[in-house]
Image: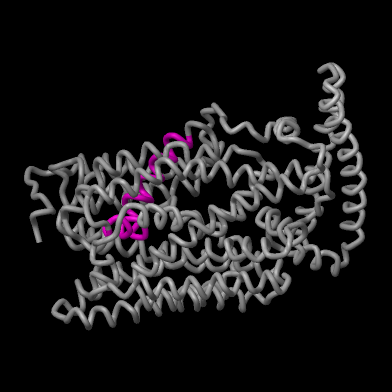
């Protein structure tokens, strides 16, 4: 990066820390640290909720996925507006009236302490590991493109995030998320503008759409009912609905945000805001990936975008094989580039479709050849490394480093850092609140002063931050287990959602039914994940349904409103 980029980068992070401190000065006690004294408005909460979900790996990984597969990933998010309406109607009123600190605190009032402790423990276990991945995943990418040691990258992100989270609690986190979410919006706009500006002068918007359509990159709907197909309209609308309900309705990192609202109406408006803006934002992020696919029809793409993997294979005994693949890749790209330029000229001259179709078929053939060569190179790298290639995460950063002008590059790299930090700070406040409220205060010291719990909360935040950093530093040695950790959420979420639905909707559900249902649901999902090929989005449906069936089968006769119990 240039000096200008470093100035932009430094000014951004200095401003973030100063802004976080300024906004956190109104905090009072533990309620201020964890819930901002329940005084925030829907706009700040809504942007923070979006920032929590929009991690750096989403920002850079989704674009890379769209580069390879087009817009199909959008199907995962199509049910989110429906989920937000259900949350506003069912979940939020229960949480808000109960005046709780954590989502799992509600379950003790509704059921018993063991149900609360188990659900909170499952959250801590899954999110504690996820916090390390939130740091590691973007750090390894940024280390390669910036030429830094990954330890340095992890420490920079970790130390800055832990510092402002400890300093200002949830208020600092939410207002920092607001700035970082706005930065992400700006980054998306800048990236789209830079990509269009990088195309040849004679390539218009219609040409971009047409070239992307040759391989159906704009096609986003798959009507298949095949449960082993990861991304279909049905897995998105059904499995995605259950996932969104579980994530936004049972995960403390999300529930904690709308508990900071000044009123029930403000909580609901924050979620409705997400219902309207999350899907369009995801569409624009995916569009960046498709535009990269079109862009590299005119500019030579790397055979492998991860320069660290390239260095590893070229230093190995199989370097000649990789060189051969690179030569073939360059030759096929030149043929595709020539055919694509002819197609653009033909469209400009408004020639007949019969004259355009041979060029279209020719480009499609070259696309397939290039995809095959990329697959062969990834297989070669995987054999040398002894682990799968994660090249997809480097497509967008590689473009930034190579083609984006000074100043804008610093801004966009800051956006990627911001996305990583906005997810990590959310994890830290949620982990801290669940640890202190659900375990320390509940089981170890229930008579401490507010000042005591505030001190413990900051210590716990530091401890979880340290754990995330240490796990991130170690994560590179785990190989394929990293993918397994990323799937933990889908294994737990459905069962957690089932417990909360029992609490909200089945008045005669019992503590025994909820606890046993949770265990059976978790066991069922684990069995499905191990012994079937069912796509992971359906795990959420399986877990929810099993818990509900068991809970209803073991229901009793009495019910007490948790909002009125203590």
Q: Is residue 52 visible?
A: yes
Residue plotted at (91% across, 43% down): 334
Residue 353, x across and y down, in percent: 81, 18
Residue 187, x across and y down, in percent: 59, 55
The residue lying toward the viewer, choosing from 369 and 115, is: 369
In this figure, what is the number of numbered marks? 0
Asked whether residue 326 is drawn in magenta, I would say no
Q: Is residue 368 visible?
A: no
Asked whether residue 244 is drawn in magenta, I would say yes
User: In the drawing, does residue 348 fall left or right of residue 68?
Assistant: right
Q: Give the answer, above or below, for where 110 lies relative to 350.
A: below
Q: Give the answer, above or below, for where 515 lies relative to 147.
A: above
The residue lying toward the viewer, choosing from 155 and 501, is: 155
Q: Main secondary structure of the magenta part?
A: helix
Classify the position of the C terminus by image quarter. bottom left
Residue plotted at (24% across, 54% down): 515
Q: Which residues are magenta?
A: 235-260
């Amino acid at each position: 990066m240039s000096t200008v980029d470093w100035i932009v980068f430094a000014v951004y992070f200095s401003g973030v820390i100063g802004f976080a401190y300024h906004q956190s000065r109104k905090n009072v006690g533990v309620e201020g640290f964890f819930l901002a004294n329940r005084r925030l408005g829907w706009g700040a909460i809504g942007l923070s909720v979006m920032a929590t979900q929009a991690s750096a790996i989403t920002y850079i990984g989704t674009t890379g996925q769209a580069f390879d597969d087009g817009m199909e990933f959008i199907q995962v998010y199509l049910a989110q507006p429906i989920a937000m309406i259900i949350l506003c109607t069912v979940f939020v009123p229960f949480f808000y009236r109960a005046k709780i600190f954590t989502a799992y605190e509600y379950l003790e009032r509704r059921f018993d302490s063991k149900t609360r402790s188990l659900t909170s423990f499952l959250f801590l276990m899954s999110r504690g590991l996820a916090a390390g991945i939130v740091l590691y995943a973007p750090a390894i990418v940024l280390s390669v493109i910036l030429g830094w040691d990954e330890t340095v990258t992890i420490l920079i992100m970790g130390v800055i995030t832990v510092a402002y989270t400890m300093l200002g609690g949830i208020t600092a986190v939410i207002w920092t998320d607001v700035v970082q979410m706005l930065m992400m919006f700006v980054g998306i706009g800048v990236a789209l503008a830079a990509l269009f500006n990088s195309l040849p002068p004679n390539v218009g918007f219609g040409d971009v759409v047409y070239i992307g359509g040759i391989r159906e990159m704009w096609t986003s709907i798959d009507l298949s009912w095949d449960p082993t197909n990861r991304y279909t309209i049905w897995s998105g609308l059904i499995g995605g609905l259950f996932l969104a309900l579980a994530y936004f309705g049972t995960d403390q990192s999300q529930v904690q945000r709308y508990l900071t609202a000044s009123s029930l109406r403000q909580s609901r408006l924050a979620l409705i805001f997400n219902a309207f803006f999350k899907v369009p934002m995801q569409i624009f992020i995916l569009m960046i990936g498709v535009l990269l696919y079109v862009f590299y029809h005119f500019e030579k793409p790397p055979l492998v975008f991860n320069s660290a993997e390239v260095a590893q294979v070229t230093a190995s005994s199989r370097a000649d094989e990789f060189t051969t693949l690179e030569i073939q890749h360059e030759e096929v790209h030149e043929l595709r580039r020539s055919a694509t330029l002819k197609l653009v000229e033909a469209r400009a001259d408004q020639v007949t479709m019969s004259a355009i179709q041979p060029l279209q078929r020719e480009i499609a053939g070259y696309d397939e050849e290039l995809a095959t060569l990329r697959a062969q190179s990834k297989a070669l790298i995987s054999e040398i490394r002894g682990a799968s290639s994660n090249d997809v995460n480097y497509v967008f950063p590689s473009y930034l480093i190579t083609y984006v002008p000074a100043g804008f590059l610093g801004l966009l790299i800051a956006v990627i850092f911001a996305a990583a930090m906005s997810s990590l700070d959310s994890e830290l406040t949620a982990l801290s609140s669940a640890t202190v409220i659900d375990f320390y205060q509940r089981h170890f010291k229930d008579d401490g002063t507010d000042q005591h719990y505030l001190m413990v909360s900051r210590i716990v935040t530091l401890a979880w931050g340290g754990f995330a950093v240490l796990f991130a530093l170690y994560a590179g040695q785990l190989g394929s287990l990293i993918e397994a950790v990323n799937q933990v959420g889908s294994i737990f979420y459905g069962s957690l959602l089932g417990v909360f639905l029992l609490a909200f909707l089945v008045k005669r559900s019992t503590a025994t039914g909820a606890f046993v249902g949770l265990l059976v649901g978790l066991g069922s999902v684990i069995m499905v994940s191990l012994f079937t090929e069912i796509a992971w989005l359906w795990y959420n449906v399986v877990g929810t349904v099993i818990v509900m069936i068991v809970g209803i089968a073991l229901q009793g006769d009495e019910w007490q409103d948790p909002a009125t119990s203590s």
